[in-house]
Image (cartoon, rainbow, N blue to C red):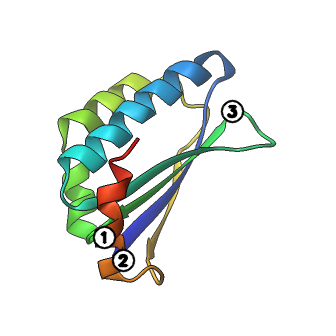
Amino acid sequence: MYSVFVTIDVKPEYLEDFEQASLNDAKGSVSNESGCLRFDILRDHSLNSRFYLYEVYRDEQALQDHLQTPHFKIWHSTVENMVDGDITSVKMNTVFPSGSGWENQKKTTLDW
């Protein structure tokens, strides 16, 4: 499995708008992309304007496919002026859960 951990600082006046746009992208990803197994949105406890996205994909190609989806393109165009500074990301291979563990968790990821 292939994962990405994204760090995004958001301008204070856009926090709620950013969160909503990101939620739409996350829901679209886990609902409509068979290769997206998890998409978490996290907000820093100490720095309220910092968000983290943790995404797990079946493989690197599934991540590349995600970047071409309508919901990602809408998210990107919506939030590009809300971001304060550069978006950073770390790409990783997952160790635990196993590949089948991630596949099995996808069903419950859709239970909002």
Q: Which residue is mark 2?
A: 101
Q: Residue at x 44, y 62 (%)?
A: 4
Q: Secondary structure at mark 2?
A: helix
Disc 3 or 2, which lies upstream in sequence? 3
Q: Which mark is residue 49?
A: 3
Q: Quadrant where the N terminus lies? A: bottom left
The vertical placement of 69 against 59, above or below, is above
Residue 71 in view: yes
Single out the mark in the foreground, 3 or 1: 1
Q: Residue at x 48, y 50 (%)?
A: 40
Q: Quadrant of residue 69?
A: top left
Residue 84 in the image: state x and y as whole percent: 61, 31
Q: Which residue is mark 1?
A: 104
Single out the mark in the foreground, 3 or 2: 2
Q: Residue furthest top?
A: 13
Task: Look at label 2 and name its amino acid.
Answer: Gly
Residue 67 in view: no
The vertical placement of 91 against 28, above or below, is below
Do labels 1 and 2 touch, CB within 8 Å?
A: yes
Q: Quadrant where the C terminus lies? A: top left
Is residue 29 found left or right of 98 in the rendered image? Answer: left
